[in-house]
């Protein structure tokens, strides 16, 4: 999955939860076009980021137990070649850093884990 599609999926999950219009887990997964097990994985990941996601058996929907909203910002900036060299010591190393910040080996996004590995690679 591309980086933007990944963000869009999580924004869609957030929107449906805020509207309290997810349905049961099977319906929610179907709306998102993913398996139910993958839905549970996504919800677990969002909970690990601190979102207070709960499920109401009475309403048959996921909801936020506190007032929150997921906000993801992506900022892309062009930098000059001399800045690339100053940042990483070389163009190839910088490309490696950027790629590892976005994806792990399974193709999923892992910022903090990859950042730790990337910083170790640079040192």
Image: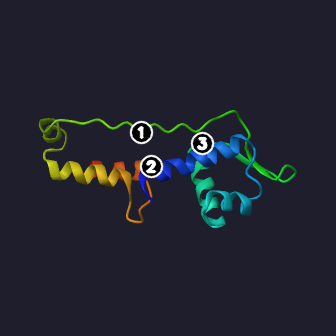
Location of residue 1 by image quarter: bottom left
Relative image position of residue 122 (x, y in whole percent): 22, 49
Rendered image coloring scheme: rainbow
Residue 50 is marked as 3
Q: Are marks 3 and 2 in contact (CB under 8 Å)?
A: no
Q: Is residue 101 visible?
A: yes
What is the spatial separation of the Cα atoms under label 3 and label 2, in whole angstroms?
Answer: 22 Å
Q: Residue at x 73, y 48 (%)?
A: 54
* Residue at disc 3, secondary structure: loop
Which residue lies under the disc numbered 1?
Answer: 74
Camera-side mark, 3 or 2: 2
Establish if 64 lies above or below 45. above
Q: Residue at x 74, y 44 (%)?
A: 63
Which quadrant of the structure image shows residue 87? top left
Cβ–Cβ below 8 Å for labels 2 and 1? yes
- Which residue is nearer to you in this view: 64 or 6? 6
């Amino acid at each position: 999955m591309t980086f933007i599609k990944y963000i869009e999926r999580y924004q869609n999950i957030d929107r449906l939860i805020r509207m309290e219009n997810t349905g049961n887990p099977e319906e929610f997964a179907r709306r998102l076009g993913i398996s139910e097990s993958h839905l549970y994985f996504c919800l677990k990941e969002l909970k690990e980021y601190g979102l207070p996601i709960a499920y109401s058996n009475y309403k048959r929907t996921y909801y936020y137990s506190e007032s929150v909203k997921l906000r993801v910002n992506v900022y892309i900036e062009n930098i000059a070649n001399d800045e690339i060299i100053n940042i990483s010591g070389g163009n190839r190393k910088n490309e490696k850093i950027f790629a590892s910040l976005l994806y792990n080996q399974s193709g999923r996004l892992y910022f903090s884990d990859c950042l730790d590995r990337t910083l170790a690679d640079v040192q």
